[in-house]
Image (cartoon, grey):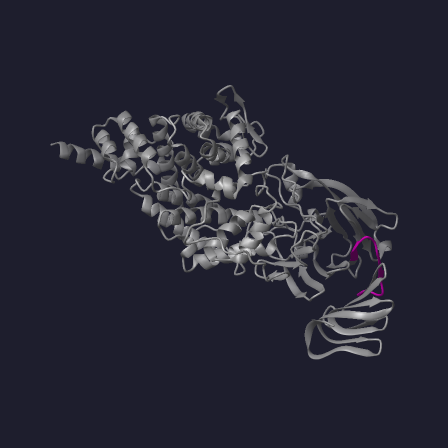
Amino acid sequence: MRVTAALGLVIAMTAAYADVADHPTQITDAELFAAMDLQRPGLDDVRAAVEAEDWPAAGQAWAAYFRARERPTPHFQRDTWADWVRAAHPQLVQPIIAEADAIGAGDISHGPYVLRVEGREIMWLENPTKDTNYVSAVGSQWFLNPLGRAYLLTGDERYAQTFAWIFDSWYDHQDAIRAGQGGLGFDPMFRAYYPGIRARILADNYYCLAPSDALTPELHLKVMKQLLGCAAWLYAQNSPRYRRGNQQVAAVLGCGIVGLVFPEFRDAERWVELAEQRMREHMLDDFYADGGHKELCTQYHKTVLRDVGYVALTAEANGREGLFSDPEAGPALERAYEWLAKLVMPTGETPALHSAVFATDYAVHLELAARHFGRGDFAWIAERFRARGVAPNQKSPFALANYMVAPPTDEAPIPEPERPEWLSLHLAESGFAVMRTGWEPQDRYLVAQHGRANTGHAYPGALHFIYEANGELVASAPGSPRSYRHPAYAYCHTTGSHNVVSIDGESYPNVNGIAPGGTCELLADLPDAWLFSGAHEGYLEPKDATIRRDILAIKDGPVLIRDRVEGAEGHEAQWNFHSPLAMTVRDDRSVRLSGLADYALRPAWPGEIAEVTREERWAAVLPRDCQPEDCGREVSVLRWHKPIDPDGARFAVALFEGDGAIEPLGESVFALTCGERRWLVLFGDEGGRIEAAGVAAIARCACVEFAGGEPTRAWVFAGTRLTVGDRRWHSSDEPVTREL
């Protein structure tokens, strides 16, 4: 009779569990335990209490079981993690504790959004400015990250008590939060990827804090109900189909982590299988062949690596083969990590590509990738940043990726660091051309963008460039504030916020929310010179215009930027330049930039410039300036204005260290002078013949350097002939690129 009654109870509970995804905030005790396999070892007391429908006793039994349970774990073990972090990554300790202390003092926030807290009452329903960061606070719950880790580092019960206070209050306000929506007009808790992030953070904290008496049996059950609700809802939402973009990866993260860390749930295995399936699909379909995520944004590239990596690490920590070892996803992951490594700047940041910031959290990813793929070059780049002794950052002082650090294993040790083989390179599929003269802060770095992204996080700034020299950023990028509703974001998302040519001060249009890219027509890296040539048609439809750009960098000399607007007669073109350095516009319309070193921007044809304007605009995080407020400090913006005549508009600008001069010797020939050094640059455009000042070439571009009036070296790009004076320096049957 007892067996029959128990069986009937289980059947009834299982039937009720089938609807959990429809009411994830109102899961009953019966539904929670019906979702579990109570026949698993160690759950005898839980099962007995459930069969007796003694839910308080079942909660006590579960709490006792989970406190004592040793495996599975997240990607780290709570009894060894603190000592290892103090030894291997001591720079992470104080930021974790400081953030946890701030939360205990009532600082519950995300970016510019701050929840009002009075005493111990948290105003969960308030969002007076309708800031979307409200979602990150009440839905994703990013702010909870440090509490469990601070508890492991200190053993201080205050952190467990803080978690219990906040989570218990939040849990009891769930339905009211969903009903009020913070004035946003959508569910801030069960929508998109929010439950995926929340589940990961709750699982992490719950595992760290489980030994504490601050987590009562009632709270244990509330956490488990929330984890169940998140996983069940996410599975229902994401099992039907693959969806492009980073958000689905963050969503199925929750399925993967809940399934891996809580195999007591009956559906744990299928949750994990869904997470790994979707993550595998994203690695294969949402990344270019060169490893770049198709959103072309370093931040969201790393977001996907963070979520995929967290699941892979947790799988391996529990004896399951993870995506690092997957025959298809593994190589794709390695390429994605390599893409990051290839973009690292000499000062130790990844650049602010599209809706990203200059950031250093790549170091966490490269350390993990170094040991999983045996890459000494990854280890070398990560070690160079760690030598600073500061915590990796993203949009806030303490990057979320820092919570991924974990000890290497015997199977995956960190390899001996090896200096990377590459300097300059072309990430052709994603569309970034990179020049790097070395890895020291004083080295030069230039990245030019021509790729087309697949997301609204992409900016209409094709052919934009970022330039660094002498340990400082000279030409900056707009990047992004932490809040996409901050007024700065609208400006960052414009053509005029980039180092490009714009028309009529307007942005070229997105197509279905996607900013068009351009094409790379020629890219060449020679020992002492680098050339990028490209074009884009973003203005073709609204202005009937095409914009072409050449960037020639003499690696120990000036940088020449040449732009041409074809079409758009009767409109105005603006040449835009953004720099965090002090900017002075001189009477001759050239510009002095002052920082750790001095630089000069010298325009050819200054008489054609109708107007020079200068302004201060928001900047996103600048290197080593981790966003103390929502936006970084202001940068100086220069705009040279020119009318577009029947022949279009032309700009040629030389960027010198110190000072120099540019002299146009025709439409496509320029003499550059800096001190005792002089260069003659000839552009053949379609590879035709061009000559000036005793130099003749059939080439896309040729550059000859002179010293004391004598030619000393030259570079020819896609050329067949180069003659200097009466000497033939280069002759070939097919166009070649070489240094002479």
In magenta segment, residue 469: no
Q: Is residue 518 above or below residue 731?
A: above
Q: Is residue 38 left or right of residue 499?
A: left
Q: Quadrant of the N terminus?
A: top left
Q: How many marks?
A: 0
Outermost residue toward the left in this view: 1
Is residue 101 among what the camera can see?
Answer: yes
- Work out whether residue 250 or residue 360 is closer to the camera in this orientation and state it: 360
Residue 305 percent location from the top left of the image: 49, 49
Residue drawn at x 52%, y 28% as measured from the top left:
101
Residue 525: name its quadrant: bottom right
In terms of secondary structure, what is the magenta stretch mainly?
A: strand
Residue 721 percent location from the top left of the image: 75, 77
Q: Quadrant of the C terminus?
A: bottom right
Q: Is residue 137 left or right of residue 278?
A: right
Residue 551 percent location from the top left of the image: 72, 60
Which range is magenta? 652-669
Q: Is residue 284 left or right of residue 671?
A: left
Outermost residue toward the top in this view: 119
Q: Is residue 306 above or below residue 30?
A: below
Residue 307 percent location from the top left of the image: 46, 46
In magenta segment, residue 665: yes
Is residue 297 among what the camera can see?
Answer: no
Q: Is residue 157 above or below residue 190?
A: above
- Work out whether residue 662 or residue 597 is closer to the camera in this orientation and state it: 597
